[in-house]
Amino acid sequence: MTSDTNHRPEGDLPRSIGAPARRALAAAGYAQLAQLTAVSEAELLQLHGVGPKATRLLREALAARGLAFAERDR
């Protein structure tokens, strides 16, 4: 039995964010950077496995494509 049988491709999320963050994002339905433009950084931080380092790396990857996290009114 291989471990690849139950895993989907990771999309274009940077591998540098770490496996826990990638799993948390996948479980929440996020596989592509562009999907993260619909969610705020604060919302991502609520996901178990996504921390400040992961959100920083995601923010940088989004910015490199001219994208950003959604902004939410507080």
Image: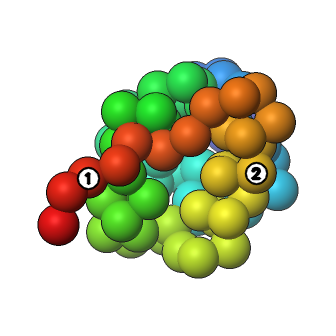
Residue at the spot x=68%, y=65% of the render?
56
Residue at the spot x=59%, y=62% of the render?
55
Q: Which residue is mark 2?
A: 60
**Residue type at numbered disc 1:** Arg
Looking at the figure, which quarter contains the N terminus?
top right
Q: Is residue 63 left or right of residue 37?
A: right
Colouring: rainbow
Q: Is residue 24 above or below residue 5?
A: below
**Residue type at numbered disc 2:** Glu
Q: Is residue 58 above or below residue 56?
A: above
Secondary structure under the numbered disc 1 in the rendered image: loop
Q: Residue furthest front?
A: 73
- Nearest the viewer among 37 and 15 is 37
Q: First in sequence: mark 1 or mark 2?
A: 2
Quarter of the figure with residue 53: bottom right
Q: Is residue 53 left or right of residue 21?
A: right
Quarter of the figure with residue 44: bottom left
Neighbour class for label 1 at 10 Å: few (<14), some, many (≥20)?
few
Residue 72 is labelled as 1
Quarter of the figure with residue 11: top right
Image coordinates for residue 48, horizontal then vertical, percent: 38, 70
Image coordinates for residue 63, horizontal then vertical, percent: 73, 41
Residue at the spot x=59%, y=76% of the render?
52
Residue 46 is labelled as none
- Nearest the viewer among 4 and 57 is 57
Q: Residue furthest left?
A: 74
